[in-house]
Amino acid sequence: MLLEHQIDKSIYTYPSLYKAHDRRTSRLLVLDHLFNTIGNGYEWANTKDPAKGGYLTEPNSRKLHGDWVRNYDLPYGKEKFQPLPEQFFSEQILRVREREQMHGLDEGPLGDMFRHHDFDKDKTPLQLAEIGVTFVSVRVRKGEGSRTTTLLHVTGYDDSNKAQFLALHKLGLTEDNASTFGGGQRVMTPYPVSHYSAIWEIYHGKDMLVQDDWLRGAVDLAEESLAHYNTEARYKEDTYYPKERDARNDRNQMAERKRKGDKELAELKKIWGYDKTNEVPTVKLILEKKTKFWEKHRADCIKFYEKFLKKYKA
């Protein structure tokens, strides 16, 4: 599959992970998942003709003589996905909560809406119109086995509007967009570079085939990740950036282990890389340790992305 087709497919299928306020941000969220994140469910394509691979895909396997054997993937570019229209990113997506989905769409207020409204007529149900939400479309997303998820595409929903949020909650609907509650805009925070990441494999792989558009996507991600680690206002929001509340939480966990016994504390301190004493470290000491870890992590990431861009950026 072409990279941009894979990106649009990911955003459309999993909006809670990737659908941000615009396509650029949504695209970066997908790129980070494809190239940086380990254990993401993607592997390099296994095609009959190796020259027609060079892209990431979700593998599938079959059982043969008692063993699992990976199936061949389609040649690069063979599988297509319809590009997302620009208005897709101005819509909000509401998901029917699993509880209501399991009991069927025929119970309670949500059931009333589904029973008495013809969604094909493109009219907004009264239950939504009353809270300022306009219906756009409805679709069903298939999951594992017989599981399905019903999604409503709407406009006019603002996740900072508590009244709207509570009204939708009563209906059995919840937000399914990759935004932050309270009106915040989702941004891409790079997953830590790992020896098992696809972007690492690209850089260190010998004679490795990567299709041009997929390589350009990795370059785009590297540029954005480098900007993240070089911009203080951005990296201060990073999960790994040292924060006093995290240091206090760590100390509380160690204090709890201490109450259970020195052995319990020693095991946790060993996992976290602390000394072998039976003392619970201070918040100041923990924060200093976290700061040293962060500074090394940030420096390592900057070094890798600079090397990657030097090698692959045209």
Image: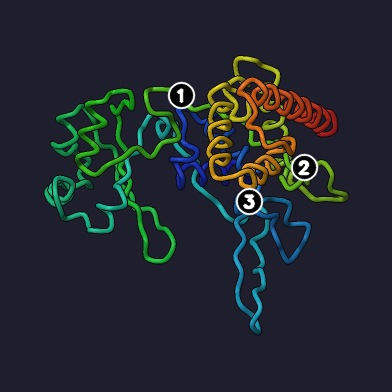
Check contact, mark 2 vs mark 1: CB within 8 A: no
The disc labelled 1 sits on which kind of residue? Gln
State the separation of the CA atoms marked 2 and 1. 29 Å
**If you read the primary sequence from the N terminus, does the residue marked by circle 3 or circle 1 appear first?**
3
Instruction: Identify the residue at image location x=60%, y=23%.
Output: 283
Instruction: Identify the residue at image location x=21%, y=54%.
Output: 105
Colouring style: rainbow
State the separation of the CA atoms marked 3 and 1. 26 Å
As helix, strand or loop, the secondary structure at mark 3 comes to loop
Instruction: Identify the residue at image location x=68%, y=31%.
Output: 220
- Front: mark 3 or 1: 3
Residue 314 visible? The answer is no
Q: Which mark is residue 221?
A: none
Position of residue 258 in the picture relative to residue 165 (left or right): right
- Quarter of the picture holding the C terminus: top right
- State the residue position of label 3: 39
Figure check: 171 above or below 182: below
As helix, strand or loop, the secondary structure at mark 1 comes to loop
The disc labelled 3 sits on which kind of residue? Gly
- State the residue position of label 2: 200
Q: Quadrant of residue 254?
A: top right
Q: Nearer the viewer, residue 302 or 137?
A: 302
- State the residue position of label 1: 185
